[in-house]
Image: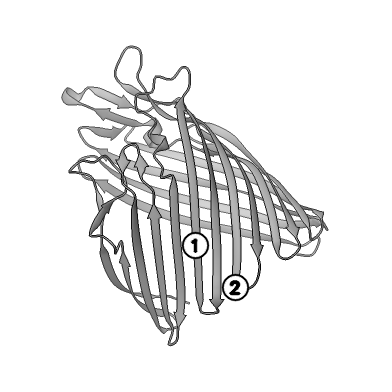
Amino acid sequence: MPVGQSRIDVQSYYQREYRRVPRQLTHHIDIFDIDAQQRIRIAERHDVVWGGGARVNRDGTHGSATLFFDPADRVYPVGSVFAQDDVAIVPGRFFVTVGAKYEHDGFSGGELQPNIRARYLLPRRQIVWGSVSRAVRRPTRLDDDTVVTGPGGIVVARGSDDFKPESLVAGEIGYRVQTSSVFSFEATVFRHRITDLRSQEMPPTGLPVVVGNSLIGEVTGVEIGVNVQPIEWWRTHVGYTRLKTEIRRTAASRDVGGTREANDPDQFLGLRTSIDLPHAIEIDAMLRAVGALPHPVVPSYTELNLRAGWWMTPRTELWVAGQDLLHDRHPEFGPDLPTRTEFERSVRIGITFRTP
């Protein structure tokens, strides 16, 4: 983009959702969102993007005898502003991006989320990069407004108006090389420091358990990816992630929920391949292998998804898709109980029409 020129983008949407969990909660929500941003090249080495957005959430709930929200209906807005500057320290070679976002929500107030990123372009189509950033998970009605009752209507657990946003400080270093049009390789090492994690606090006086923020943790890991495209119509990506998660209580914690926030698989392997055949036929396959979960224990599994599509016209596709094809069923979360939900093998056929 030439110096002095700019581009403005505005987008908006309305969304309505309805969800019903039998014997627990019925929930509907209306969302109106608008966002705007401007990109402007203010100098030869500065590419600036700034903007903001606003969202209004209006929901209503119908609880059960054991679970409901208090209040049942609520309107909660979210507003944000952001700015970032991509600076060419050494044009064509070394770039640094500095930015920040300020977000204000109806539950916890405002939070600043800064970030800094750098990338260095090396000879022979190589690049190294690194970043440090802060992000938050803002509270939801599940954190603030949930009420759980037991026999006789006794409140056994509830949310808290004092619940704070969960905070993440993330650092990463990465490397990528594309040796040719056929092969590329990338690797990223990361470490995340998490504070104010959601906990379940038992007051000294006993029930009810109250939602709190007395857990902290670290997540470290490495991600490796390989892209192979031996011929124009055949593309394959292989990705592997190794993850170590440690969650612990703070000194003042009275958490009784256990460190279930650490219930992540320690390994993940994924392979995806796409083939474009003559006569507008496309075939996609995805194989995934996921490590076991520790709390509660869920065994590791390997599954395969397949999809084939035929573009009868440029805007009409006939397709068939199979999911979780290697087993009749398998669990992915939850304790080993007869009521545990398991994912079953499925096959679907459909037709898609696209408008201009």
Tell me if residue 168 comes above or below residue 284 in the rendering: above
Give the Cα distance between marks 2 and 1.
14 Å
Which quarter of the rendered picture does the N terminus lie within? bottom right
Tell me if residue 164 comes above or below residue 340 in the rendering: above
Residue type, numbered disc 1: Val
Tell me if residue 100 comes above or below residue 152 in the rendering: below
* Residue 121 appearing in the image: yes
For disc 2, the marked residue is 182
Residue at 40% in and 28% down? 199
Q: Residues within 10 Å of mark 2 (few under 14, many from 20)?
A: few
Q: Position of residue 157 (x, y in %)?
A: 30, 26
Name the element at disc 1.
Answer: strand
Residue at 35% in and 69% down? 306
For disc 1, the marked residue is 238
Most foreground residue, 339 or 65: 339
Residue at 59% in and 50% down? 188
Taking the view exactly as shown, the residue that stands out farthest to the bottom is 279
* Residue 70 appearing in the image: no
Q: Position of residue 85 (x, y in %)?
A: 73, 50
Residue type, numbered disc 2: Val
Tell me if residue 125 comes above or below residue 35 in the rendering: below
Hey, which quadrant is residue 269 in on the image?
A: bottom left
Q: Left or right? Give the position of 37 relative to 162.
A: right
Q: Position of residue 87 (x, y in %)?
A: 77, 52
Most foreground residue, 177 or 56: 177
Most foreground residue, 182 or 162: 182
Mark 2 or mark 1: which comes first in sequence? 2
Q: Position of residue 259 (x, y in %)?
A: 39, 31
